[in-house]
Image (cartoon, helix red, strand yellow):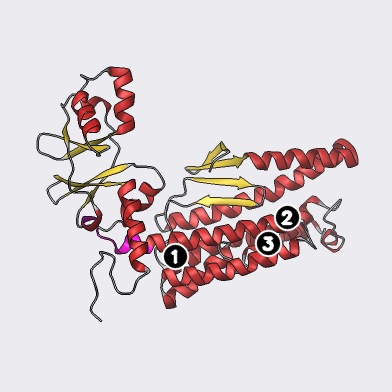
Amino acid sequence: MRWSFDVAKVAGITVRLHVTFLLLLLWLAVSHYLVGGWPAMVQGLAFILGIFGSVLLHEFGHALAAKRFGIHTPDITLLPIGGVARLERLPERPHEEFIVALAGPAVNVVIIVLLYLGFLATGRLDVLQDFALVGGSFWAQLLFVNMWLVIFNLIPAFPMDGGRVLRALLAARMGFVRATELAASIGQAFAFLFVLLGFFVNPMLIFIGLFVYMGAASEASSAQLRDFADAMPVAAVMLTDVRVLHRETPLADAVEILLRGTQREFPIVDGLGRAVGMLCREDVIKALRQHGPEVPVARVMQTNVPVVGRWETLTRIFTRMMEGQHQAVAVVDVHGHVVGLLTRDNLAEVMMVHGAMAASASVDWRGRTEEP
């Protein structure tokens, strides 16, 4: 996420802070200091850090549950309105999403139970009766905050946890895409309610409402793209008029092809015609400046680019390409020989054509007229 920086790495998961989170801490520190001096500032910041510590553990609950299903979580980002655990991919089955979604609130329930047992063991249950959000016991405040996190996150407002639980339940009956669309609509209805309440109760609800609304719209769009990728064969959308370069080919040859044609990405092959790398336009320009035109393309190509089989669907590679992780990937046959090319530009064009064709019931996605 942009405007975020790394602060720690736990169990292979990078913890990141968004710059707006630090601005929130600064604003709270100044506000509490002006009201009650240093003691008030320390107490206020400790409370806020306690809240976000609970939020961070909540997100680790999601991450560890996802890991059980083979889903890695690259990072968790803390924002002023909460945390976001970025999963490597969505759970594939409704029951998996159900478990992953509930794992976060379950962590907060564990925190509540532990704090309550702590009060019970020390004989200090009276602090719960005299609870005050400002000026009360820190641990009592933390207990009630975690109760609020459980209740709030289980509101069925997609993409919050409750909304994901709702989608998992709906997906078991009506399919992933339709379930996402319905859950997103419900989430957007809650978003309008949050914004309305924000004008009368707490302005923070306005920002939460906007976050929920945009998140629901994004999730609905992502579900449609996922459905598109699941159904689309690579062989149907790949570029087939493709020039490949041998690994010993001088960069000057790539420059000539680049200037004389429209191809901007070049699969690099070995003597058997198997893909060993990719050379993109930006790589060509950078290599010309650093090495000159006679350098072999094998020295300047990208080597960490995956290949995809022509018999596969777009599912495995689509998301990574559209997020910008790969500009192009080589398409190979069963022997590993390059037979085509997928680029972000041609995928975007296919999606536009698919959307236009889908608007007409008389044609399929390849433009063939359907019989009445």
Image height check: is 218 above or below 258? Answer: below
> Which of pointers 2 and 3 indicates the residue nearer the eye?
2
Residue 330 location, quadrant: top left
Left-right relation of 131 to 248: right
Which amino acid does the dot numbered 2 rest on? Met
Under circle 1, the secondary element is helix
Image point (12%, 39%), residue name: 273
Horizontal and vertical percent for residue 263? Answer: 24, 39
Would you say residue 230 sits in the magenta stretch?
Answer: yes
Task: Give the number of the disc on residue 204.
Answer: 2
Q: Which class describes the residues within 10 Å of circle 2: few (<14), some (14-19), or many (20+)?
A: some
Horizontal and vertical percent for residue 98? Answer: 49, 67
Image point (58%, 38%), residue name: 3
Q: Which class describes the residues within 10 Å of circle 1: few (<14), some (14-19), or many (20+)?
A: some
Q: Which residues are magenta?
A: 227-235
Q: Which residue is mark 3?
A: 113
Left-right relation of 201 to 239: right
Mark 1 or mark 3, which is nearer the start of the sequence?
1
Q: Which residue is mark 1?
A: 96
Disc 2, disc 3: CB below 8 Å? no
Which amino acid does the dot numbered 1 rest on? Glu
Image height check: is 1 above or below 94? Answer: above
Image height check: is 299 above or below 316? Answer: above
> Which of pointers 3 and 1 indicates the residue nearer the eye?
1
